[in-house]
Image (cartoon, helix red, strand yellow):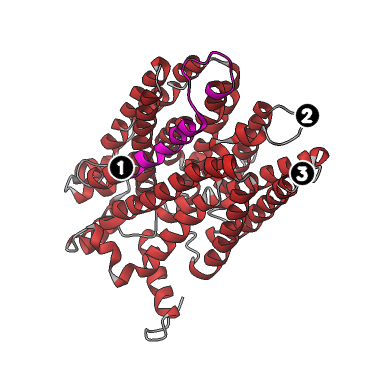
């Protein structure tokens, strides 16, 4: 009996996948907090006798304030990840989530919801600040992209959980049930190894060897240990600081960060996911807004599974380009629908078109834009500044998310849904162009090779420098 290549690959790298999966349960945990607003806000705004009363303005702050917490979380991750390791700051990120769910379950004023969402944001920032680093350092070159793609897979599982459970339980019950996220994460990740890169950087060679032996499932790890140690020694003389990110040597690395951070968020994906039921309530359909949200959650969860198998085979660049084209087409359909509706055209019988457009957007986005950037971010910076780069990525993302979420509700209340969706459509079109021009392919390369590719690509684009030869 012949074993499937996929199964053989999974078995060969099973410990790496296990550690990566356990780490990304933290992403499941924080995305439950992120998606909570979709089923929760209608319970507070539209249901008679809610546990607490809020206005739509309060609702926009409740949704958007998490992004501000995320900025502080990213900064916190940058300050702690190289000092205390990847593992224990990561584990500590579950504490604000636990505190936040308790506050929401017991809340009787909007203030507690603000505090809880801010705490959620801190955990969100820490999680996204550390996960790409941890996965990038524990995985082999051939599976790094697939393992990093688990970040988005588990994110979509968290979203689907909230969309599926939230509409059918009480406001308080939803908060208690959402506690499953931190519980699962803590029960599994506490047993996972620390990053061998971090341990080597701290001179804890014996621990690094044990960690690497468990991850690779072999005792023959001396060659990799030596290569990793040499890589660390090459960067040890350079002081890893946030200022170093802005050196000319990392100019194009920063361009990539900017494109990925702003491109991901200005597409409007966070607005669609956070206000899903609110958006669907404006679309005429035989399905309820809650049912459409569940369909959306299922579709994107299934879709993001494909890049896990494709990102290390097809490559990062093609997936990003295909994702950009599909996302733009989907958003265009939605924008046209809401524009015609605002113009007084009877579009009631065409509600399915906008719903299909949103689904196509989510599918296309999940196929590349939602997944590939984390694979790229886990490999484009050297170890000594990787944490700062991820912090910068998170800060830029947090600012963009806050602006999108806050302004989306304002535009919805004062202008109409067509305005933000046209902004999203144009933004994703521009992102496609920037990806085409500025992001090189890095599939199947070691971390050191990736640095050389980006450095060579920079010289190739700069006529004053030597031309890079692959």
* Residue at the spot of label 2: 286
Secondary element at tag 2 = loop
| Residue 290 point in image, percent of width and height | 65, 26
* Residue at the spot of label 3: 353
- First in sequence, mark 2 or 3: give its number: 2
Secondary element at tag 1 = helix
Marks 3 & 1, CB-CB < 8 Å contact: no
In this rendering, is residue 351 above or below 236? above
Q: CA distance from mark 3 to mark 1?
A: 40 Å
Taking the image as shown, residue 201 lies to the left or right of residue 121, namely left
Residues in magenta, as a range: 44-72
**Quadrant location of the N terminus?**
top right
Q: Quadrant of residue 49?
A: top right
The prevailing secondary structure element of the residues shown in magenta is helix
Q: Quadrant of residue 295?
A: top right
Taking the image as shown, residue 179 lies to the left or right of residue 221, namely right
Residue visible at 55% across and 59% down in the picture: 315
Q: How many badges with numbers are in the image?
A: 3
Residue visible at 48% across and 18% down in the picture: 177
Q: CA distance from mark 2 to mark 1?
A: 42 Å
- Any part of residue 370 in sight: yes
| Residue 203 point in image, percent of width and height | 16, 48
Is 298 magenta? The answer is no
* Residue at the spot of label 1: 72
| Residue 352 point in image, percent of width and height | 77, 39
- Any part of residue 445 in sight: no
């Amino acid at each position: 009996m012949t074993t499937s290549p996929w199964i053989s690959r999974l078995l060969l790298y099973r410990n790496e996948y296990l550690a990566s999966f356990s780490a990304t349960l933290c992403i499941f945990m924080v995305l439950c907090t992120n998606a909570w607003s979709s089923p929760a806000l209608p319970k507070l705004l539209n249901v008679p006798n809610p546990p607490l009363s809020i206005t739509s303005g309060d609702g926009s702050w409740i949704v958007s304030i998490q992004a501000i917490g995320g900025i502080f979380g990213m900064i916190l991750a940058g300050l702690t990840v190289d000092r205390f390791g990847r593992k224990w700051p990561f584990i500590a990120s579950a504490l604000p989530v636990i505190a936040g769910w308790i506050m929401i379950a017991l809340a009787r004023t909007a203030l507690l919801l603000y505090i809880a969402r801010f705490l959620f944001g801190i955990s969100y920032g820490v999680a996204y600040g550390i996960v790409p680093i941890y996965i990038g350092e524990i995985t082999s070159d051939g599976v790094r992209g697939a393992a990093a793609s688990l970040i988005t897979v588990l994110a979509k599982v968290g979203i689907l959980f909230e969309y599926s459970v939230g509409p059918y339980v009480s406001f308080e019950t939803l908060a208690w049930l959402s506690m499953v996220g931190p519980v699962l994460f803590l029960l599994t990740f506490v047993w996972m190894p620390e990053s061998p890169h971090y341990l080597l950087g701290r001179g804890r060679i014996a621990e690094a060897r044990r960690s690497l032996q468990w991850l690779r499932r072999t005792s023959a790890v001396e060659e990799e240990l030596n290569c990793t140690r040499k890589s660390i020694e090459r960067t040890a003389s350079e002081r890893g600081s946030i200022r170093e990110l802005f050196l000319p040597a990392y100019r194009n690395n920063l361009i990539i960060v900017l494109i990925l951070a702003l491109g991901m968020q200005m597409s409007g994906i966070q607005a669609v996911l956070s206000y899903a039921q609110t958006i669907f309530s404006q679309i005429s359909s035989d399905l309820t807004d809650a049912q459409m949200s569940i369909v959306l959650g299922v579709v994107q969860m299934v879709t993001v599974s494909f890049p896990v198998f494709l990102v290390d085979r097809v490559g990062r660049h093609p997936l990003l380009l295909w994702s950009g084209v599909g996302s733009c087409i989907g958003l265009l359909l939605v924008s046209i629908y809401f524009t015609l509706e605002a113009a007084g055209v009877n579009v009631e019988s065409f509600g399915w078109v906008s719903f299909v457009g949103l689904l196509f957007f989510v599918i296309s986005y999940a196929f590349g834009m939602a997944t590939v950037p984390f694979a790229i971010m886990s490999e484009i910076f050297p170890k000594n500044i990787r944490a700062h780069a991820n912090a910068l990525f998170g800060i830029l993302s947090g600012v963009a998310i806050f602006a999108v979420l806050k302004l989306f509700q304002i535009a919805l209340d004062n202008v109409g849904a067509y305005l933000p969706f046209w902004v999203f459509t144009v933004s994703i079109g521009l992102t496609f162009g920037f990806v085409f021009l500025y992001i090189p392919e890095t599939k199947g390369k070691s971390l050191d090779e990736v640095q050389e590719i980006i450095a060579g690509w920079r010289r190739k684009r700069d006529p004053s420098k030597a031309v890079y030869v692959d």
